[in-house]
């Protein structure tokens, strides 16, 4: 089984989290019953797209993604998909939580993303941990925005 070995792996997963988050918030905005909830979800969708762009630029700066030795792309993508499918936002019951309490649902998503980065950081060499830390800091900014 493939494993994360460098910051590029974690950043590639971060891009997918943001991509899925964008789609999730867009869907939530289209289904929102209250205008303020719709505005909030639309704003968060834009934030997810902004983060996706930041992480894509970061991945390019550090040299792109390399598959771990002994694995193929299909195995690697399956591994990343399994990791991401346990993320709070992508679990079926999260949609209901997000609709009932938009701020709590969004906070749960952002906190779960930070937990993901924190857990993955230990698999990255010390020289790459600053990149994982940058991802975490971006998500912490989302928490500050939600709190405001």
Image (cartoon, grey):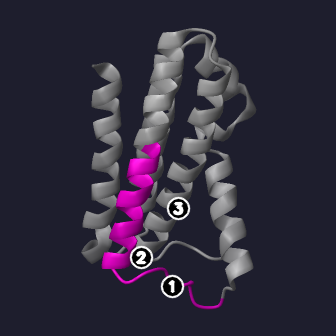
Q: Position of residue 94 (x, y in %)?
A: 65, 27
The one nearer the camera, 76 or 3, is 76
Quarter of the image where the C terminus is located: top left
Magenta segment includes 66: yes
Residue 122 can be seen in this image: no
Q: Please, what secondary structure does the residue beneath circle 1 have?
A: loop
The one nearer the camera, 67 or 58, is 58
**Residue 13 — which label?**
3
Do residues under tags 2 and 1 come within 8 Å of each other at their CB atoms?
yes
Q: Position of residue 124 (x, y in %)?
A: 39, 71
Residue at left offset 68%, top offset 81%: 73
Mark 3 or mark 1: which comes first in sequence? 3
Q: Which residue is mark 1?
A: 66
Badge nearest the viewer, 2 or 1: 1
Quadrant of residue 98 within the rendered picture: top right
**Are there few (<14), some (14-19), or many (20+) residues within 10 Å of tag 1?**
few
Task: Compute the Cα span from label 2 to label 1.
Answer: 9 Å
Quadrant of residue 77 within the rendered picture: bottom right
**Residue 17 — which label?**
none
Magenta segment includes 100: no
Q: Position of residue 135 (x, y in %)?
A: 34, 55
**Are there few (<14), some (14-19), or many (20+) residues within 10 Å of tag 3?**
many
Q: How many marks?
A: 3
Badge nearest the viewer, 3 or 2: 3
Residue at left offset 57%, top offset 8%: 34
Range covered by the magenta-colored residues: 48-70
Residue at left offset 62%, top offset 17%: 32
Q: Which residue is mark 2?
A: 6
Main secondary structure type of the part rendered in magenta: helix
Task: Compute the Cα span from label 3 to label 2.
Answer: 12 Å
Quadrant of residue 72 within the rendered picture: bottom right
Mark 2 or mark 1: which comes first in sequence? 2
């Amino acid at each position: 089984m493939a494993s994360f070995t460098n910051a590029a792996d974690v950043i590639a997963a971060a891009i997918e989290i943001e991509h899925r988050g964008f789609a999730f918030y867009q869907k939530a905005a289209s289904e929102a019953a209250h205008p303020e909830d719709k505005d909030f979800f639309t704003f968060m969708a834009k934030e997810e797209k902004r983060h996706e762009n930041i992480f894509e630029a970061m991945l390019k700066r550090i040299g792109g993604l390399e598959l771990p030795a002994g694995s193929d792309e299909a195995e690697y993508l399956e591994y990343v998909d399994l990791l991401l499918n346990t993320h709070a936002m992508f679990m079926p019951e999260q949609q209901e939580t997000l609709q009932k309490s938009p701020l709590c649902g969004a906070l749960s998503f952002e906190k779960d993303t930070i937990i993901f980065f924190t857990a993955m950081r230990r698999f990255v060499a010390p020289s790459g941990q600053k990149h994982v830390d940058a991802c975490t800091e971006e998500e912490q900014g989302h928490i500050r925005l939600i709190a405001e």
